[in-house]
Image (spheres, helix red, strand yellow):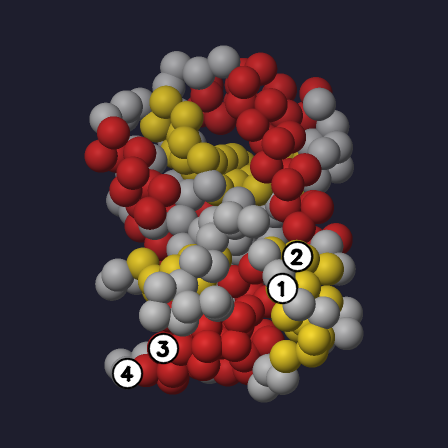
Amino acid sequence: MPNSKILVVDDEIHILELIGFNLEKNGYEVIKATDGIEALKLAKEHTPQIILLDLMLPGMDGYDVCKELRKCSYTANIPIIMLTAKGEEFDKILGLELGADDYMTKPFSVRELLARVKAILRRTTQQYEEKKYVFGNITVDFEKHEVLKDEVKIELTLKEFELLETLIKNKGRVINREYLLEKIWGYEYIGETRTIDVHIRHLRKKIEEDDKNPIYIQTVRGIGYRFNEVQ
């Protein structure tokens, strides 16, 4: 999506310049970083629409950068494409579990990279503009703060609605409990995160057909929750 800001993070200058040149040629605004600390600083200052993140960085590697980006409320929802010379399945899975949206192994085609950037930006723009979301027999109206089940209004508390909205707008992505606490309750919660689990349990009782075997709001053991896109 032309004019979108893209942060490119890579310690190999020739790759950084190659990617930057091609993105700018296609109308994107490019911000560059050569290490993890600089990447975190620039991500918070510029809030780019997407981050291209090399895995093998000096000092703070791409995994740690990804974890820090997902912890911060300003950068938690920015899509990340990991770029790395590593091609092992374990590395890919770990990157995706930490919150990366996509993964490309070097050497890669610049044309393919541009296609993936466009696809992710198109998807996230559509999600941002979404005013209603329908899944199963549930309709969520984000403007009216209203949820209908079989066309009948369900009474949700404000926190339950905000929790559902956050999960839906990050559908398919694992969201950790700490981020949900900071985002919805407005503070960082140290230690016990039971309040999230209690609200999730109440929410499931209201929207799931069988709250003991949820289809939509799934638990990712040891991490948090994910909204399942199954319709």
Q: What residue is drawn where x is 28% and y is 23%?
A: 87
**Residue 27: % across, % down:** 74, 28
- Residue 134: which numbered mark, if any? 2
- Type of amino acid at the residue the image marks with label 2: Val
- Type of amino acid at the residue the image marks with label 3: Asp
Judge from the rendering whether residue 149 lies leftward or rightward of residue 110; answer left or right: right
Judge from the rendering whether residue 25 lies leftward or rightward of residue 159; answer left or right: right
Cα gap from disc 3 to disc 4, whole angstroms: 10 Å
Q: Nearer the viewer, residue 72 or 181?
A: 181
**Residue 66: % across, % down:** 38, 49
Cα gap from disc 3 to disc 1, whole angstroms: 21 Å
Residue linked to disc 4: 192
Residue 98, can we see it?
yes
Q: Nearer the viewer, residue 171 or 178?
A: 171
Residue linked to disc 1: 138
Q: Earlier in the sequence, mark 3 or mark 1?
A: 1
Q: What residue is drawn where x is 45% and y is 35%?
A: 102
Q: What residue is drawn where x is 68% and y is 37%?
A: 122
Please tell me whether mark 3 or mark 1 is closer to you in this view: 1
